Image (tube, rainbow, N blue to C red):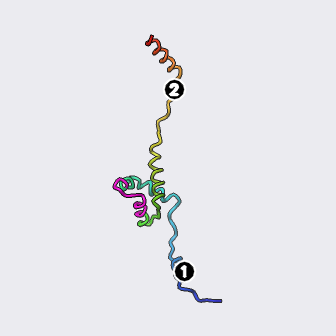
Amino acid sequence: MDTDVSPIELALQKRLEKLQPKTKSSGFLRGVIIRQSVRIDAALANGYSYDEIASIFTEQGIKCKGSTLQKYHLQEKNKGKESTIPLLKEDKSANQTKIGQSEKKLR
């Protein structure tokens, strides 16, 4: 049996021993994007692209693609556009009365 360890294997072993536990939970990236939404809007208004903003996230240790950033950011922005005004139900009896009154005025 060969007991010699290759330099590649030694490098791999050292790298694996240095790994820190992951602390990011699911939804971490989405949460960061939501919290930074106003600043992302400002960067976009200043002419930066989603890819350029995503590279800043990556530089700070938050792995992110421009397409993912755009998707999460736009989903968050569109949440606010949903109408909270309830639809009014039409009262047909009141409508019929108005039509009858309008017909009388025309005669």
Q: Residues within 10 Å of mark 2 (few under 14, many from 20)?
A: few
* Residue with the mark numbered 1: 13
Kind of residue indicated by mark 1? Gln
* Residue with the mark numbered 2: 90
**Residue appearing at x 47%, y 18% in the figure:** 98
Q: What's the magenta region?
A: 44-56
Q: Residues within 10 Å of mark 1 (few under 14, many from 20)?
A: few
Please give the label number shown on residue 78: none
At mark 2, the secondary structure is loop
Which residue lies most toward the left here? 46
For the stretch drawn in magenta, what is the main secondary structure? helix
Residue 59 percent across, percent down from the top left: 41, 67
**Residue appearing at x 57%, y 86% in the figure:** 5
Residue 94 among those drawn in magenta: no
Kind of residue indicated by mark 2? Glu
In the displayed structure, 38 sits above or below 95; it is below
Q: In what quadrant of the picture does the N terminus appear?
A: bottom right
Which residue lies most toward the top here? 107
**Residue appearing at x 37%, y 55% in the figure:** 44
**Residue appearing at x 45%, y 43% in the figure:** 81
Mark sitting earlier along the chain (2/1): 1
At mark 1, the secondary structure is helix
